[in-house]
Image: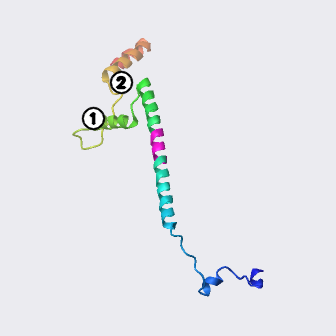
Amino acid sequence: MKAALGGGPPDVGKMLGGEEKEEDPDAAKKEEERQEALRQQEEERKEKYARMEAERESMRQGIRDKYGLKKREEAEAEAAAAAEEASEGSLTRPKKAVPAGCGDEEEEESIMDTVMKYLPGPLQDMLKK
């Protein structure tokens, strides 16, 4: 409706070479101040989260001390060192430890003796031969 009344769109003046907006001489200074404020806010935010993380870590350390726990990194490093120490000098992967009682012939004999106790006399004689 403004176009019909002669107001026209706001860009018409620029197309005809008319008035151009002058930049504010303080615009650069204001932009620089705004950027500095943003940097300062970012630094404050990082400091705040660093303090929070330090508080959390002190709480974690208190819990570790109270219950005798180790940090994950320390526990993982010790486990890796133990595995490396066990396989030192080996060209293959480390072998798994055999549980106690597996493959012990002495224990197998004692089991056999236990079974023999419960068998009737003639079966015992047959198995002993």
Residue drawn 42% across the image and 30% down it? 61
Q: Select label 2 or label 1 by which is in front.
A: 1
On-image quarter of the C terminus: top left
Badge 2 marks a residue whose secondary structure is loop
> What is the number of the mark on residue 55?
none
Q: Quadrant of residue 85?
A: top left
| Pointer 1 local density, CA inside 10 Å: few below 14, some 14–19, many at least 20 | few
**Which amino acid type is shown beneath numbered disc 2?**
Gly
In the image, is residue 49 part of the stretch drawn in magenta? yes
> Answer yes or no: do the residues labelled 2 and 1 have beta carbons within 8 Å?
no
In the image, is residue 128 part of the stretch drawn in magenta? no
**Which amino acid type is shown beneath numbered disc 1?**
Ala
User: On the picture, is 108 further left or further right than 89?
Assistant: right
User: On the picture, is 58 further left or further right than 128?
Assistant: right
Q: Main secondary structure of the magenta part?
A: helix
| Pointer 2 local density, CA inside 10 Å: few below 14, some 14–19, many at least 20 | few
Residue drawn 43% across the image and 32% down it? 58
> What is the number of the mark on residue 86?
1
| Residue 32 % position (x, y) | 47, 62
- Whichever of callouts 2 and 1 sits on the residue coming sooner in the sequence is 1
Q: Is residue 100 above or below residue 83?
A: above
Q: Is residue 100 above or below residue 52?
A: above
Residue at far front of view = 25
- Name the residue beneath numbered marker 2: 101
- 77 or 90, nearer to the observer: 77
On-image quarter of the N terminus: bottom right
Q: Is residue 114 above or below residue 53?
A: above
